[in-house]
Amino acid sequence: MRAVIYDEPGSMHIGEAEKPSPGEGQVLIEVARVGICGSDLNIAAGLFPPTPFPITPGHEFSGVVAEVGSGVDFLSPGTRVAVDPSLFCGHCQWCYVGRGNLCDSWGAIGDTVDGAAAEFVVVPARNCHPIPDAMSFAEAAAVEPLSCAVHAIDRVPPRVGESVLVIGGGTMGLLTGQLLARGGAADLVLVERSADRRPLGEQMGFHASYDDVGAARERRTAGFDLVVDATGVPAAIQSGLDAVAKGGRFLQVGVAPPESRIELSPFQLYNQEITLHGSMAVLDSYAPALKLIADGVVDVNPILTHVYPLAEYMEAFEALGRGEGLKIQISPGASL
C-alpha cells in the first residue's frame, strides 16, 4: 500500500509500505479522509518528544472497516467509522483516576504508532465510532479536533455572561469558539492576524475580531474573564496572559515547542486571583464531539477548506505550513 513516511526529523516521503493485518481486538480501516494538524508540523520537525521515527502520521481520520481481527464481534466489514486515536495504558496512576490523556505511557495513532496518512491503518476496534449515514467522511475526520475542543471546554466550563478572548483563528480556535458561543459568552472576541480568517470567525459565532491582542484590549480595558490561546506561539501566550481580567482564567490549548518559555508574575496570580489551565488532547470527549456534529450543533464544514490526494501530501503539508486555508485533509482510500 502507499503511505506517507516521516523518515526522521526534517525528512519525509511517500512510498510503499506493507499492508497491515488486524490482530486480536483490532480492525483494518481503509482510510477515507485524514486531516493534517499543526501538531503534524511539530512531529515532522522532531519537536514532539514521544514520536519515534520512522512513522506514518495521521491522527484525525475516518474510513471503512475492511477486516476485523479475532475477538471483534461489534464491528463488521463495511462499517463507516471515525476513530479516536487515543492509546492509554489503562494501568498507570493517571489511567486509574480517569485521566488517561496524562497516561505515563501515553500514545496516539499517528503520533506514537503508524497512523492514517496511508491507504490502510490498523487500529483497536474499541477506538472506532460508527458514524451516521448523513455524516460525510470529511466531517467524521474532523471529530478528533472537535474532541480536543470539547475536552478544553470540560477543563474550563463556560460561565454565562462572561467575556472571552480567543487568540488564534485556526481550526482549534474556531471550534473552541463555537462551543463558547453556545455556552453563553456575553462578549466573544477573536484575535487573528489573517484578514481572510477574521470574517469566518464572526460567521461561526464570535462577536468581533481583531488583528492583535492590543486592539482587542481597547474593547475591554479591564481585561477578559477567560482568555484562550489556540496558537502555541509564546509571544501570543504572553500577550494573552496580560489580557486576563481580575479573577479571570487562562486556558492553554495551542501546542507550543517544548523548550518555549514565557514570563509569569506570581504577584499577579496572587493579587488578581488568576487561574491557569492546560488542555491536553482528548479525554472522554470523542463521542460527545461526534454527536455535536451529527446533531448539527457544531458545523465543521466552514473550516474544511482543502482536500488533496495522498500523492500530493507534500504539497498539502507545505500549504499548511504557509498558513493556507484551515483544515487540510488527504483522501487516501483508493475505493472511497
Image (tube, grey):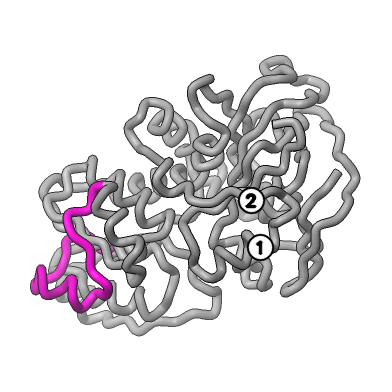
Q: Residues within 10 Å of mark 1 (few under 14, many from 20)?
A: few
Residue 171 visible to an observer of this rendering: yes
In this image, 20 relative to 217: left or right? right
Across and down, in percent, residue 67 comes to 80, 25
For label 2, the SS is strand
Magenta stretch, residue numbers: 205-227
- The residue sitting at 81% across, 66% down in the picture is 7
In this image, 24 relative to 289: left or right? right
Q: Is residue 192 above or below residue 263?
A: above
Q: Nearer the viewer, residue 120 or 278?
A: 120
Asked where in the image residue 131 lies, by quadrant, the reply is: top right
Residue under pointer 2:
308
**Mark drawn on residue 315:** 1
In this image, 141 relative to 75: left or right? left
Dots 1, 2 in contact, CB < 8 A: yes
Where does the C terminus fall, quadrant-wise?
Answer: top right
- The residue sitting at 9% across, 71% down in the picture is 222
Label 2 amino acid? Tyr
> CA gap, disc 1 to disc 2?
8 Å
Q: Is residue 27 above or below residue 270?
A: above
